[in-house]
Amino acid sequence: MLIQRFKRPGFLRDVFAVSSGSAVSQVLAIAASPILMRIYSPAELGIQAICISILFVGVIGSMRYNQAIPLPEKLDESIRIAFLALFVLAVMTILVGFCLHLFIKDIAAFTKAPKIIEFIGLLIVIFLFIGTSEILLSITLRLKKFRRLGQAQIAQTLVQLGYQVIAGLNVPTAQSLVEGMLFGNLAAIIVYTLGIYASFKLMPRINLSELRRVAVAYSKFPLLASPSSLINGASIQATPLLLAAFYSPEVVGLLALAQRVIGLPVTTIGYGVSKVFFQRSAEVQNQTPAELLALYTKAARALLVISILPITVLALTGPQVFSIIFGERWSDAGLYASLLAPMFISQFVVSPLSTIMAVISAQKQQLMWDVTRLVAIGTTVFVAGQLNLDAVYCIAMYGACMTLCYIWLYLLTRKQILNKNKAHLTL
């Protein structure tokens, strides 16, 4: 049974290969945080978070054609999709650059962060690098070079943090933080490229008609997955923008540190699980789809068990630990981390497994959930700001809203898997 493959060392080995790189990156990021937080101020970290929020559009750099790369059985088809994704990314980079030139001053005024106007060139290049890295990641995943994914993450983290520390010791500015992101993504691109170039020695035929064919064959990704990813990113990244508008970049910086200390382990470990789970769930769907729900349920249960204890401990000791490690000016970040603990647990359990929605062609339902979450989060922060509530109450409301949204996503995904199984039984 394919469900046994989840229990066998193969699955665990692949998760470990990816997650070990994520874990090392996480340790490096957390270890560097006390240094970075004593070099940079909450406002400077907040400006970086605002730039990251702007760059969330990078998730649709290739209009999600990169997600289709691991799906075909034949490598030639995957390579054709990869070339299509690179072409789309080039076009999108030009469009995003044009839009940034038009609206960057308005964004800077809205977020009370005039410095970001100076970063427009950096943001465009980072957008291109993020998209390229995602495409190369998908090719690496298609080739099952899971260890290479971990190596790329470590390289990206090392270069980014190293640059930010060295540049910050010279002149600690928000620009140094943003430049570190650029060089980190470039390092990841180099590592991915070194790992996959040998597989491209025998290239399939690539011409306009072939690109047009794969564009149509996988059109669900730009038409449904792309808007869903954009809204998904917006629902997360709108929060720093709204907090900057209603409160200040300092509040954004405090939230960014809380997410770095607790959210980073959640996202980095979940990253490894999501990549391997996506490949495994696609395999199960192709061969024995009736086992898909069991695979999903078992993975969710395992993630819940793993997450509860460490996140709860960090939540209970957050304010004290943050003050000791990062300095008194970051104590509120520890309070934010405590308030967001339920959100981090639910995110750790549900988010990495949501890639299964693409496997079962449930992009419409994913899009519906993403839209609802965006509206719910935007409304929550907006209402808190309009009522002039203290930032602490706003963060607590935001965390509760996110937790409920992730619980709903879990139930929605189970329902869609069951519906998919019924469809197979009637064929």
Image (spheres, rainbow, N blue to C red):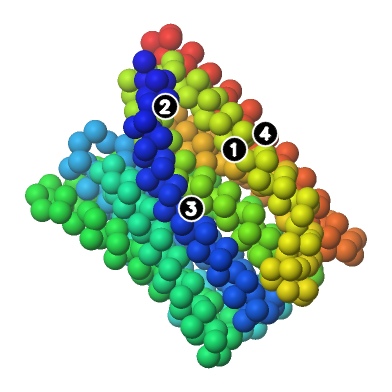
Drawn side of residue 90 relative to residue 227, left or right: left
Question: Quick one: label 3 or label 1, which is nearer the N terminus?
Answer: 3
Q: Amino acid at mark 4?
A: Trp
Location of residue 195 by image quarter: bottom left
Per the image, the residue denoted by label 3 is: 23
At x 53%, y 64%, the residue is 29
Identify the residue position indicated by label 2 in the image.
6
Which numbered disc, 1 or 4, marks the residue that appears first in the sequence? Answer: 1
Q: Residue at x 49, y 34 (%)?
A: 357
User: Does the residue at mark 3 contact the one at mark 1 (Cβ under 8 Å)?
Assistant: no
Q: Secondary structure at mark 4?
A: helix
In the rendered structure, which disc, 2 or 3, sits on the residue that comes first in sequence? 2
x and y percentages locating residue 203 in the rendered image: 12, 50
CA gap, disc 2 and disc 1: 16 Å
Q: Residue furthest front?
A: 324
Residue at image coords 73%, 74%: 327
